Amino acid sequence: MSEYVSPSKIRSMFSQAMSTMYRDEVPAYSDLLEIVETTNNSVLKTSRAADLRVDQDEDLDRISDERHGAIRVGTASELSMIRRIFAVMGMVPVGYYDLGVAGIPVHSTAFRPIDRDALAQNPFRVFTSLLRLELIEDEALRAIAQSTLSARNIFTPRAIALTELAEENGGLNASETAEFVQEVLETFRWAEDAIVTEETYKKLHDAHRLIADVVGFQGPHINHLTPRTLDIDAAQQEMIERKLPAKAIVEGPPKRDCPILLRQTSFKALDEKVKFVGAAEQGTHTARFGEIEERGVALTPKGRALYDRLLSSARAKVQPNPDGSNAAAYLEALSAAFAEFPDDWRMLHDQELAYFRYSVVGEITSGDLNGLLDAGVVQISPIIYEDFLPVSAAGIFQSNLGDDAAHVSLSLSSRDQFVAALGAEPADEFAVYEAIQNASLAKIPLRKVS
Ligand code: OOG
Ligand code: NI
């Protein structure tokens, strides 16, 4: 057994290789990494970091390496194969996101590690979307899209062989791992040769820009990588100062003392040169971008329901325009709505709005957990949210589709179809956090006093 490289180690190596590749492909991503490193280093010297407990346990080490990425695949078999590949890296599907409700023709899951130790070693996640081809109304165009997708092979034969080997043997040794990482990287690499003619590309693009991005190319190029910042407002300000084309508003909850869930912002997708099939001249395609995120505590179903209610009430008052023209009004509505959300760790804990880990820092004298918390004998530290938010994701998608992007109108949720394509039931995110919380509680030797 010990000759096998741990899935967490494979995941770290892969995440690192992906970051190096993306820095090369999208130079602005390097700027973003620099901004995040600088702002994180200054936050780590403040009490905010202490509050987030990022200076305790192993959570500090992961900060500078922490990131997520996103891809969009075209077929059920691509999705199920990518699931098997990610499994070798200790990443399993968590959650189901129906972006159709926001007019985006995909549904998605996030591949990520789920247990506490694996998350602490490297929490790399990949937001993975499956295109819903049935939404192309024009039958002839849908047939072209289908045959284009079924003719392509997005995985190298060696990547498939090594995945099968890992499944058979229960792991990969060091040299197999090195090869696996390089082979899998090929699936995510940008290639400027399109696999359709310019005419087909335009038709796909008119149906929806995302359809052209998925169907038009040889593979599901990584479309962004997102480092984690400890202060997204400072990082966003720095992006603007460096003249990166930053998105108008930060998605998610407003700035708070006790960060919850996830706040995200991105810089807009770049125009890139492509070569269409049979074309003499170069064309362009706009897809890849950079994003940063600030993560806070994971919410319980009760906390999440409150979050969803407050977010919709703010959005019912002010719907943020993509051009940022009403950004100030939106942020004001958001802050006003969220005044109702407790902004104190202990309140979030006591009202069962968020998940925490417990640790013993003194002598246990009774079985009363709240008493021990009051006495400072037991401490709570927020369990970081590792997942995504559908409204925010829709905002990120949209800001990178351009303001002129066609909207498909659809609301039919097709979770069953997604699960069938994936070949597995995605884990329930709440259950994952609850298990981490319960495991830490079980380690507290609560003494019954008679
Ligand atoms: C994925 C957008 C969603 C996020 O951070 O919410 C996402 C995509 O554009 O493919 O990555
Ligand atoms: Ni993202």
Image: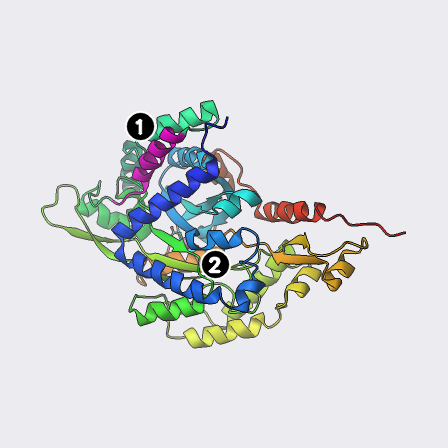
Q: Nearer the viewer, residue 122 or 325?
A: 122
Q: Amino acid at mark 1?
A: Pro
| Horizontal arrangement in the rendering, residue 146 relative to residue 234 (left or right) | left
Residue at image position (63%, 67%) is: 344
Q: Can see residue 131?
A: no
Is the shortest distance between ligand 1 and the CB of mark 2 under 8 Å? no
- Mark 1 touches mark 2? (CB < 8 Å): no
Q: Which residue is mark 2?
A: 391
Which segment did they paint magenta?
174-190
Residue at image position (42%, 51%) is: 65
The residue positioned farthest toward the right in the image shown = 450
Image position of 43 with respect to 286: above or below: below
Residue at image position (32%, 28%) is: 158
Image position of 358 with respect to 334: above or below: above
Q: Residues within 10 Å of mark 2 (few under 14, many from 20)?
A: some
| Horizontal arrangement in the rendering, residue 71 relative to residue 299 (left or right) | left
> Residue 22: where, in percent of width, then height?
30, 50
Q: Amino acid at mark 2?
A: Val
Q: Which disc number belongs to residue 143?
A: none
Is residue 358 magenta-colored?
no
Quarter where residue 362 is shown: bottom right
> Residue 412: where, in percent of width, then height?
48, 48
Q: Which disc number belongs to residue 157?
A: 1
